Amino acid sequence: MKQDFSRTNRLTLAQCAGLYLAAAMIVIGCTPPPGANLRAEPSGDAGAPTVTDTRLCAAVATYSLATGDHWDQRAAIANATLNRFRKLGMVPDCGPTLTRIVGAGLNTYRWQASLDAVDSIRSGSYQLPLACVRADTVSPAVAGSARTHCVIADLAFHEGGAR
């Protein structure tokens, strides 16, 4: 029996293939990178996974702290967060915060921008002003603070925060 692949059937096949490809891309895009430290053990928040992956937790901090659509601010937050992790010698569990972000409705643009900022700092492809490079603490900008050497938008970046 001969199959009839008319224009309508071809469009339907193309649409199904497109949907399949889109679903596969979503699964691939949501898969954590190899070596990501994701465990399904409960942490402080009941039901929240324990997440201590450097990239993901730095992106969580960047997503949470950025006050606007400022690339340099996101990069400075990512840098300060990574510096803090190095100073602590560990990555604190960001699973509960990540769970809250997802539960509140993840803004995909902000999330991708946060991941991009972390990646650009880690790779060295984005250079911050020297006044911001050693910061390991982020706080709201306060006029006249003696410790503040780097201010981007309404956030101040400091070096030597308390452990």
Image (cartoon, rainbow, N blue to C red):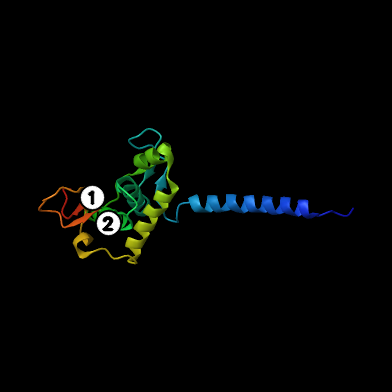
Count of all numbered marks drawn on residues in the image: 2
Q: Mark on residue 50? A: none
Query: x%, y% of residue 114?
Result: 37, 53
Q: Which residue is labeled 2 in the image?
A: 76
Query: Tag 1's secondary structure?
Result: strand
Q: Amino acid at mark 2?
A: Ala
Nearer to us: label 2 or label 1? 1
Say few, some or many: other residues with alpha carbon within 10 Å of mark 2 (under 14 / 14 to 19 / 20 or more). Answer: many
Left or right: 48 in relation to 82: right
Residue that protrudes farthest toward the top in the picture: 46
Q: Which residue is labeled 1 in the image?
A: 155
Figure quadrant of residue 98 = top left
Q: Nearer the viewer, residue 37 or 33?
A: 33
Query: x%, y% of residue 80?
Result: 25, 55
Q: Is residue 50 above or below residue 87?
A: above
Q: Amino acid at mark 1?
A: Leu
Q: Residue at x 64, y 53 (%)?
A: 18
Q: Is residue 100 above or below residue 112?
A: above
Residue that protrudes farthest toward the right in the picture: 1
Query: Tag 2's secondary structure?
Result: helix
Q: Residue at x 33, y 57 (%)?
A: 71
Distance of label 2 from label 1 (alpha carbons): 10 Å
Contact? badges 2 and 1 (CB < 8 Å): yes
* N-terminal label among 2 and 1: 2
Q: Nearer the viewer, residue 12 or 38?
A: 12
Query: x%, y% of residue 91?
Result: 30, 50
Q: Residue at x 41, y 47 (%)?
A: 38
Q: Nearer the viewer, residue 87 or 39?
A: 87
Say few, some or many: other residues with alpha carbon within 10 Å of mark 1 (under 14 / 14 to 19 / 20 or more). Answer: many
Query: x%, y% of residue 121?
Result: 32, 61
